[in-house]
Amino acid sequence: MPLATITSSSTNNSRMPSSRIGSSLFAAKYAPRYSGLFPRQLESAMGAMEQVAAAGLGDAALWRSLAPGLHLHDEEWLQRQRPLAIPSELIESLRGLLREEGYFQLPPQPWDLPIDAMAQLVRMLDERGIPLPFSFMYDEFWILYYRLHGMIQGLLGPGYLRLPDFWTWLVDPQRHESGWKPHRDKGWQSLREDRSPKSITIWLPLTRTTPLNGCMYLVPAHRDPTYGTPDDKDWRHEPADIRALPAEAGSVFCWTQALLHWGSRTSPRGEAPRISVAFEFQAGDVPPYNQPLTQPTEVPDLALRLKLVSQQILQYRHMYPLAPEVEALAKRLLG
């Protein structure tokens, strides 16, 4: 299946049309506060952002210098990418798990992508104080989700769409950080009558995750008394029903956006940071949860990636202390 490119000039308030050339995270109003998104001092982040902006954020040479082993809207490379083959019987099993338990976890996949190099890029951005969603300037971070196209289509149906909600985390045990606090991404209204999802989150660890470095915790849907009900802000689950989900790098997590979940508090014994990315998708037959929606077989050009990353920074600014200068820069980039 050939990929297409969308450009910043092709966007509107709903769906972005594509020009054929080949190639959230969670909706902000539902997201909890999380104070560790800019792990370095805000002054450092501001300084790094101003330096990057001065060098020209739309200049591929700038981003290539930061990660020469990764791709930047490399059309030839993008044309060669293909989704993973997902057996239909597995998809049917996964659909059943989403209806029953609200989530599933798969072992590391044959990504044919440099997962270690992608994690190293996130570390480098963190060290320089650059907001981590700028990792999505690189093709590999978009292709991660394109690899899962067949699976997502099987879960949400043909015509599913990619939401402009994504994020990148580095949760560092040496800084005593934690992941997101307990929350439901969108709540009970994101489910159909049969408990199948209208929208999903796909969370991918790029490093090994354990209870000591911030692995995911959740309450399975069938053990959550208020899951899928208008009372889902009232948490009545038993502590024994909480499930920890350690995982190896390259594993796949998917959950409905009604599922109660969180990232654990780290311990200095956790050694390496937890690095992960997530993206949201919705069925094509429901109103947009956020805009602009895009086709999952389209990859944004660099100019549009800048706008989308800026959108993430701004739509989550209620979740972390954002320096005015960084906010102003994101607004300028978003236009």
Image: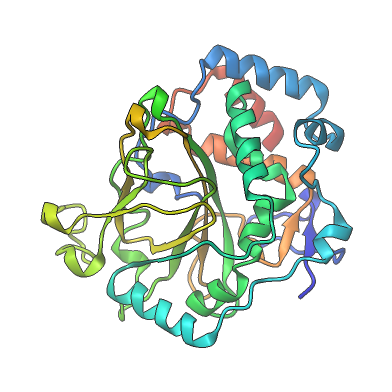
Q: What residue is shown at x 67% (from left), y 66% (from top)?
A: 295
Query: From where the camera sits, is residue 129 visible?
Result: no
Percent coordinates x, y for residue 59 in the rendering? 85, 34
- Between 54 and 241, the residue placed more toward the observer is 241
Residue 128 as seen in the image, left or right of residue 254: right
Query: From where the camera sits, is residue 25 visible?
Result: yes
Tell me the quarter of the picture where residue 103 sits: bottom left
- How many marks overall? 0
Tell me the quarter of the picture where residue 318 sits: top left
In the depicted structure, whether residue 110 falls above or below residue 36: below
Residue 40 as seen in the image, left or right of residue 210: right
Percent coordinates x, y for residue 301 in the rendering? 79, 50
Q: Quadrant of the N terminus?
A: bottom right
Percent coordinates x, y for residue 190 in the rendering? 37, 65
Q: What residue is shown at x 78% (from left), y 67% (from top)?
A: 3
Q: What residue is shown at x 57% (from left), y 78% (from top)?
A: 86
Q: Quadrant of the C terminus?
A: top right
Q: What residue is shown at x 63% (from left), y 29% (from top)?
A: 125
- Between 285 and 301, the residue placed more toward the observer is 301
In the depicted structure, whether residue 177 falls above or below residue 118: above
Tell me the quarter of the picture where residue 308 sits: top right
